[in-house]
Image (cartoon, rainbow, N blue to C red):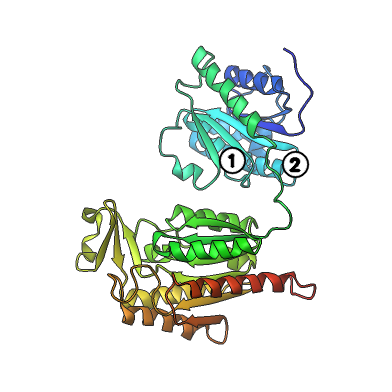
């Protein structure tokens, strides 16, 4: 085999080399033929291989999880062994890629247990480093393993158990894909600052205007759909310090978390920027609504509420007075944890497109309770700006954009506190 000069970015190959070594040998040779340095990690519980060099053996991986592989094997507790191997592999991957520009991508393959280990381990790797897994589970729901990570799954078609023409073709195609992705990311252009912004159909006009205004000022804007997974993705990237500022226009996922809607981002929503000290402007956008599926899926306890059929499979429920008070408290409590610059902006004439005078969800009393609760908890502690306009009005977008820009400029000053 002719091996061209090694490319700058190497590739990590991870998987169970005890039972899948023959197939991994094909992947290894393909990556080497493409000029990639290959770092190999064996997560097999039963043994290893001599078909290709192994950089990190299973015992070393298991030791990172604080256990001895021999003890686990004697106990014959496969479930515990798989979980511990995934933990150790995750620690190793994180250590290998942190601050290491020579790692261009990660590739693995496996069946049920092997895929579990690989996907859990890849979950420890930051956004932007290509992660590809050939798996027998690729067509199943593996949301609990992949979550919001940028992991690409490739269906193995046949089991990863021996070399044949089908798996060989899949492996070779995957090697080409990893080679194409590895080391292709470049640093952001110039000195543009990155701003995350949350949006929903009912706040699109506001977000579009904010995006245009920020782009004109030289900022890069990254919109996230506040549908649960979008909020989780935004929070995760904020924690990874990917953004310089956050314009959280649409905090509706808090309402779904409170009422059991389908767009909950969990209890950690609206916490990342506060913990990281990243400048943020927070708006109670779309806290007037909870998202459910088709009408027949709505819990019986809500049958007497006000609904809006957004689409055949999405039904919006208007939050009531009591829920708005609780949401005001929850939003305020999260904002109060901020270790960096933060402010809250309240559009007094409505917080969604259908929450304006004459529209389906307009409820001045409930909105007022939301606004009053936030002001009472935050006034004197956090800046709260009230604006006599609707969330989708040009005036509101201009105000929140001006505020986030001011925060970013203030933190850039030489004498600014480095929070």
* Along the line of sight, the residue nearer the viewer: 96 or 311: 311
Vertical order, 330 against 13 (above or below): below
Residue 341, position in %: x, y? 63, 74
Determine the secondary structure under disc 2. loop
Is residue 340 visible in the rendered image? The answer is no
Q: Residues within 10 Å of mark 1 (few under 14, many from 20)?
A: many
Q: Residue at x 46, y 45 (%)?
A: 144
Q: Are marks 1 and 2 in contact (CB under 8 Å)?
A: no
Give the Cα separation between the discs numbered 1 and 2: 17 Å
The circle drawn on residue 122 is 1
**In this rendering, position of residue 280 left or right of residue 358:** right
* Along the line of sight, the residue nearer the viewer: 87 or 123: 123
**Which quadrant does the C terminus fall into?**
bottom right
Q: Which residue is mark 2?
A: 101
Determine the secondary structure under disc 1. helix
* Along the line of sight, the residue nearer the viewer: 284 or 298: 284
């Amino acid at each position: 085999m002719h091996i061209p000069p090694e490319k700058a970015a190497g590739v990590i190959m991870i998987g169970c080399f005890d039972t899948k070594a023959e197939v991994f040998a094909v992947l290894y040779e393909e990556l080497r033929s493409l000029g990639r340095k290959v770092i190999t990690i064996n997560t097999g519980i039963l043994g290893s291989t001599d078909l290709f060099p192994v950089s990190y053996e299973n015992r070393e991986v298991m030791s990172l999880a604080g256990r001895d592989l021999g003890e686990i094997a004697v106990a014959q507790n496969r479930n515990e062994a798989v979980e511990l191997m995934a933990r150790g592999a995750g620690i190793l991957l994180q250590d290998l890629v942190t601050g290491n520009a020579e790692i261009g991508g990660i590739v693995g393959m496996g069946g049920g247990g092997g895929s579990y280990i690989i996907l859990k381990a890849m979950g420890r790797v930051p956004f932007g480093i290509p992660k590809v897994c050939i798996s027998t589970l690729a067509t199943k729901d593996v949301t609990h393993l992949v979550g919001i990570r940028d992991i690409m799954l490739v269906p193995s078609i046949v089991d990863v158990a021996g070399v044949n023409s089908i798996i060989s073709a899949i492996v070779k195609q995957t090697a080409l894909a990893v080679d194409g992705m590895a080391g292709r990311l470049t640093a952001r252009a110039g000195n543009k600052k990155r701003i995350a912004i949350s949006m929903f159909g009912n706040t699109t006009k506001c977000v579009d205007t904010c995006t245009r205004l920020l782009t004109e000022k030289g900022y890069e804007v990254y919109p996230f759909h506040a549908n649960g997974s979008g909020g989780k993705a935004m929070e995760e990237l904020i924690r990874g310090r990917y953004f310089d500022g956050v314009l959280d226009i649409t905090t509706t996922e808090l309402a779904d978390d409170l009422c059991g809607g389908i767009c909950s981002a969990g209890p950690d929503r609206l916490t990342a920027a506060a913990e990281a000290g990243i400048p943020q402007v927070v708006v109670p956008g779309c806290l007037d609504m909870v998202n459910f599926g088709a009408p027949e899926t709505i819990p019986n306890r809500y049958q007497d509420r006000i609904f809006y059929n957004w689409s055949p499979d999405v039904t919006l429920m208007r939050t009531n007075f009591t829920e708005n008070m609780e949401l005001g408290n929850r939003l305020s409590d999260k904002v109060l944890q901020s270790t960096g610059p933060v402010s809250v902006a309240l559009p007094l004439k409505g917080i969604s497109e259908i929450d304006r005078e004459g529209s389906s969800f307009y409820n001045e009393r409930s909105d007022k309770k939301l606004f009053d609760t936030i002001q009472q908890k935050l006034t004197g502690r956090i800046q709260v700006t009230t604006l006599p306009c609707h969330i989708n009005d040009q005036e509101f977008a201009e105000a929140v954009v001006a505020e986030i820009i001011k925060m970013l400029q203030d933190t850039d000053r030489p004498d600014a506190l480095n929070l």
